Amino acid sequence: GGYIDECGRVMKYEYAEDKTMMLTYHGGHFESFEDYESWKQPDPNLKTRMDQFLSGRSAQKEINDTVFSIPSTGALMECSWEGFGIETFSRIVGNEKQMKRIFDDRGAFTVELVKILAENDAKMVLLWDDYGFKNGLFMRPSLYRKHIFPWLKQICDTAHKYDCKILLHSDGDLLEIFEDIINCGVDAIHPIESTTANPEYDIFKLNEKFGNKITFVGNLSPIMLALGKIPEIEDY
């Protein structure tokens, strides 16, 4: 079973050997920009979003704030390309007008949703928004600077007006655009993927250079967590 989500991503339920159910991405629903245009855009005011946020807040209080419940949303890049699939989206990248329309839609949605959450006393919002893979970025840095970062800055500025922080999750090697991310006002970044191909994309090196400008979260390799010994993990 599965479904197509509000961003046009085909999601399917799968089961691991231990019967754990997982929801996995299986490509994009949109085969063309025309498919995208005919799709109903996500509504940031959808009641279930606030219901989920308040449910998390309630659970946090029940356990005496020992765990911090952070509302989250897909933001700009990840939801955009996954709705098309990488092959179709790669063709759209060459069309300036279509690119602008897609990222403007995602940007306006995310700004409004962050505003709603922050107005309701969210102290932090997590944006899950992969910008790259282990060998580099999905697009040229200039395209991020043109289409992504103006919106990311507006998202951060909106959150900060309400004393709300922005935590950005992005896998991949982001070294070429790391300072841009900081300049947008992102407060914390996750995970500084430790298995990228670039030895310079290293949390310790980045901390030496940018540690006073952004907070680093995560960085442990899933392989180390799964197979490493406890002293090894603690030393890291």
Image: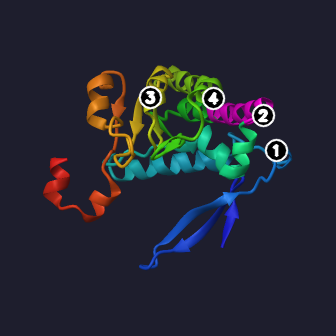
Q: Indicate whether 11 appears above or below 98.
A: below
Q: In front: mark 3 or mark 2?
A: 2
Q: Position of residue 88 (x, y in %)?
A: 73, 49
Q: Residue at x 17, y 51 (%)?
A: 234
Q: Find the magenta span and give its range.
A: 94-112
Q: Is residue 102 left or right of residue 175?
A: right
Q: Secondary structure at mark 1?
A: helix
The three-letter amino acid code for the residue at tag 3 is: Phe
Q: Position of residue 83 (x, y in %)?
A: 70, 50
Marks 3/2: CA distance? 26 Å
Locate the N terminus by quadrant: bottom right
For disc 1, the marked residue is 33
Q: Indicate whether 149 appears above or below 5.
A: above
Mark 4 vs 3: CB contact within 8 A: no
Q: Indicate whether 23 appears above or below 149.
A: below
The three-letter amino acid code for the residue at tag 2 is: Asn
> Closer to the N terminus: mark 4 or mark 3?
4
Front one among 6 and 100: 100
Q: Residue at x 18, y 62 (%)?
A: 229
Q: Which mark is residue 143?
A: 4
Q: Is residue 67 left or right of residue 94?
A: left
For disc 2, the marked residue is 95
Identify the coloring. rainbow
> Closer to the N terminus: mark 3 or mark 2?
2
Q: Main secondary structure of the magenta part?
A: helix
For disc 3, the marked residue is 178
Q: Is residue 34 left or right of residue 51?
A: right
> Closer to the N terminus: mark 2 or mark 1?
1
Marks 4/2: CA distance? 12 Å
Q: Secondary structure at mark 2?
A: loop
The three-letter amino acid code for the residue at tag 1 is: Phe
Marks 1/4: CA distance? 18 Å
